[in-house]
Image (cartoon, coloured by chain):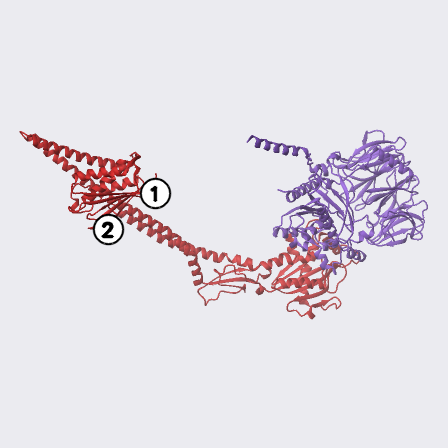
Amino acid sequence: MKTRILSYRKNFTLIASFVVLISVLLIIVLCVSYNLTKKAIDNEFSAAKVDVLEKTVLPYNAFFQNKIPEISFYQGFLDSSSAREYAQSVLEKYPFVERILFYDAQISNRLVQDGLRTSSFSIGLKGLYQYGLNVNKDSTILFSANKPGSLSLSNGDEFNKIGLKLASYIANVDTTQMISNDQIFNIFYNISHNRITYINVLRREDIKMYKDLMFKKMPPSPYYEQDVFSFELNPYKLIIKNTHPQLYQQVSIKPLSFETILDKPNLITTEIALPLAFSNFKLYLSTDKAFLDKEIRRKFLPVCLGILAVYGILLLLVFLIGRNLKVNQKLFSLQYDFINNFTHEFKTPVAVIKIAGNNILNANDLSDTELKRYGKILDEEADKLNDLMNKLLSFTQIENRSINVKNEEINIDIFSQNIIDAFQLKYSDYEILLDIKNVNSFQSDPVLLSSIFYNLIENAYKYANADNKFLKISICKIKKNIVFSFQDKGIGIDAKELNNIFKKFYRIQSRYNQQGSVGLGLAFCKELVTFMNGTIQVKSKPGKGSVFEVTLPYDK
Amino acid sequence: MPHCIKKYYFFIFLLVAGCKSSPKVEMLPVETFFKGAQKFNYRISPNGKTLAFLQVYKGKSNVFVRAVNDTARVQLTNFEDLSVRNFNWVGDNKLICEKEKDSTNSFSAFLINKDGTNYAAVKNKANTKSAILNNTIHSNNILITNNDRNESFFDVYQLNIETGLKKLFVKNPGNILVWFADEKGNVNLGVGGDGVNETIYYRATAQEQFKPIISNNYKNTLQPLGFTKDKRYIYALSNINRDKLALVEFDCVEGKESKLLYQNADADLVEVLNSSLNKEPALIAYEFEKRQLHFLNAKYKKVYTAISDKLPSQEISIIDKDEAELNFVIKASTDKNPGAYYIYNVDQTSLKKLSEVNPDIKPNNMSSMQAIRYQTRDGLTIHGYLTLPLGTKTKNLRCVILPHQGPSQRNVWGFSPEVQFLANRGYAVLQMNYRGSTGYGKEFENAGFKQWGAKMQNDIFDGVMWLIKEGIANPKQIGVFGYGFGGYSALNQVINHPNTYKCAASYSGYINLFTYIKGFPAYFKPYKLMLNEMIGDPETDIDYLRSASPVFQIEKIKTPILIAQGGKDSKVNVNETNQFVKELRKRNIAVNYILNENETQLFKNVDNKLTFYKQLADFLDRHLKPQ
């Protein structure tokens, strides 16, 4: 069985390969999405023409579906003047209608001179009128029943066509059935090249009557009025509505036979046939390739940005993970150092104890002074060990928040003076000033607070030249906080080190630092202050001294 | 705190008490109004002993008889294919009956004894019609009309009541539409016409030719009723040289009115009943707000007073009577009661109920109809009827405006299933006799000429304004509904006043006046002239007709619409209606479209009728009831 190597692993290759992977992915995704966009634009180019067509023929459809059937509403009662009014409304609203012929027709079983007749059913013409923007007012009347035989063949053509359709329908109709919409379209409309001819739709009763006229021997019948309109249309006058100007540079109406111009190889074209009466024409839509490419880019840009944003987020994550790894590694080495230091720290008192022990063991005879000296040495070294262990223990406890904070009334003056007295007893050359302003007592945990005091006072002594062991402690209340300021005249701290001094196991490499320090003191202080909801700050000038300022909330 | 709770409870108590005090009007099903009604058509035998009547058997009307004094009835016919549409006594033991149109397009007739024996069919060719002209027996014959000889004209035949064989009696000279026989069996009077001009033809004796004695056009009326004792004179209703229809005696030789018998200053006469004994007019009815009677015969007045005492505050009409005028079949009804048939015996002064028209209708659940009148913007007085829903509330009601069809008809006071149906659903219903309606004289009627889409619509709208001014209508809950011309009006009302009406329902309403005009045989020149004057000339009044036709005014319609249409309605082109509906829907107007392909103008199929009224009620509730 292979044992897993439980050691610190370096992950930078992993991160690097991940970055390479997502970069490759980025390029692939960009390429694919660009192609998709291109394809989508190509599809849109050929599909959106339906939309253009629909919008362009909208007025034509309204004309075909509403305005033409309106003729039927008049039930054949239109005459030259009312037909003119109707025609005028058509010409004004629908510019693609160029000329309107109005055949004022009559159906009977009498003989007719101008018109058509099958069996005894005849469709005669009372008059033929034309209306149009280019039609002179005087030339409105093309034919009148007053002058029989004057109907020209070309003018009568449309009338004959629809008349024949109607007659053959009447000859074969089943009068019990209702006329369907399909039949209406097939019989009452005649749609040819650029022309729609329409006869007003018959009512069921009319059809019965006309069938009787056709097949029954009857006395001469009255004349039944029918209106036939023939509309001449001009497809070029359809107003083109380019609903997709970003796709089509040019939209025009061309004859069905029109071919793409070969001298423009970069022109992309598509076409769609116009409806019914315009079936010989098509809507021809064209665009320059460059124009379309621009559109592709325009569409692709937001997609591209989106992809890049995702890529950016991934990179940021990689960066953050990498940074964390780096920090962890540093921490790891710090802890390693600490164990080294700490072991070393333990080693000295243990070695002293060992030597003292050995000496006691090996000595044949120990004088009282010697015994006392060894006893003192053992006691002192045991104290040192105990102190070290206590420090380590409380530090771990604070880190894990497993200490219960006591809240006791502390008289600041007495509290501070006691600590100062202890230090001055210990270091006779230590000069400490105390300055307390507008504050007497303070609610806090005396043990934690004294830890902070001890550490800072100890540091101030430790990091000062032998002739300059000086500390000024100022305590004052500022707003809702109490500020403890420790100002020394020590060696000071380099500006670049200021950020690090509160880190665990961090020690400034200096000659003052050769022994007795594990680099926990300030970190411990910071942990304590944070634990007590306060802050700790430092200002320092190398060579001149440092000021540590501990701010704790006064009102809890 | 407890005080507050007490107060609160007190209010709840008030609320509950308030709810209890106003009686909840029970909503009756559609069937109650439109299904239950039955026609009985009672006829009493000349000797006053037997009653014959029509009753539905397996969905068709069949003939039944019963003795006046015994309720046991005998069924004479059991047709399951065609109904009997009319019948009459021939003597005391025989009946002649007319049937509905059969598969050969012919209306046949038959004779039958009152005990159901001796069934004798009158022979009929295809496409012909037999109808009873006079049922008095002269040497074993009665008179019928038939168009055997020429489909276009009716000749008078003598029908042998034993054999059922008919013999040509009077040959139609080719222009007579209606024949009149006197009590001796002579047929010397006829009325002809082309729908516009009406001509009366007369001959003094059977040997002479018929001669036209007077012609009058559509603006006047001369309606012969029958001969007087002197066969030179006839009784007639006439408004020639006067405004209101009056009862006159007309001299057929001189061709002019010889005597004014009765006229009413306010209203046209609507009915004249002759006495069987002296053959003279006995009773005249006219209708101003309610139907009123004028008696020319003291006996009739006595009979009426006696019946009225037994049936107080009911409208009584005589349905039939025997030869001796001792037994009268009457119908009594009110605005809340569709009525019942009774037989009254003059000697015993006894009144017996025969049957009810619609036993499902309980008069206490119905609403009363009151005659109202209002002024139009041009100072005309319009008469109408207002029906308020049951309940204590009389103000701020939701309303349905119900213009009548025609327009040459009128609303009358009496039971109307449609009005009661709407009132039962909580609507106040306003009906009005706008100008152009009949019954108020020819000037009022002719005032409607060429005003279909103009002043007549204003008259209807002035009624709405009156309702609002009186506080009866809630101005936010007014709808309009009508049939035929009423439907046309409903559409015009919402076209002209889209903010007043919340919805409109058109039942076979005309949507295009051009089509309406085309629906008449307009190739007759006089007919065309009449239509030109009454409705409008489709060639010269094209702008007016367009503005008066809803199909040209689609863009002005903003309110929800209900359209019910029969596919075979000759006054409306269904393709046009389809397009009308399609166009409205395209404009996002909610349209409830009911199309019954096989119906004509008025739905005959009971299911179609019920479906229509159900949908109508839903439609009105949806748009007029606060949600």
Q: How many marks?
A: 2
Q: Badge 1 sits on which subunit? A: A
* Residue hosting label 1: A480
Please, what secondary structure does the residue beneath circle 1 have? loop
Q: Badge 2 sits on which subunit? A: A
Horizontally, residue B297 falls left or right of residue A302, namely right
Does the residue at mark 1 contact the one at mark 2 (Cβ under 8 Å)?
A: no
Query: In the rendered view of the protein, which quadrant contains the C terminus of chain A?
Result: top left
- Tell me the tag on residue B223: none
- Tell me the tag on residue A495: 2
Rendered hue of chain A is red
Q: Which chain is purple?
A: B
Vertical order, A93 against B572 (above or below): below
Residue A234 visible in the shown view: yes
Amino acid carrying label 2: it is: Ala
Location of residue B243 in the rendering, given as x and y in whole percent from the top left corner: 85, 51
Location of residue A29 in the rendering, given as x and y in whole percent from the top left corner: 37, 52
Amino acid carrying label 1: it is: Lys
Is A211 in front, or is B606? B606
Is B104 in front, or is A80? A80
Vertical order, A496 against A529 (above or below): below
Is B2 in front, or is A526? B2
Horizontally, residue B94 falls left or right of residue B360, namely right
Location of residue A191 in the rendering, given as x and y in whole percent from the top left corner: 62, 60
Label 1 Cα crowd, 10 Å radius (few <14 / some 14-19 / many 20+)? few
Query: Which of the two labelled residues, at mark 1 and mark 2, occupies the earlier sequence position?
Result: 1
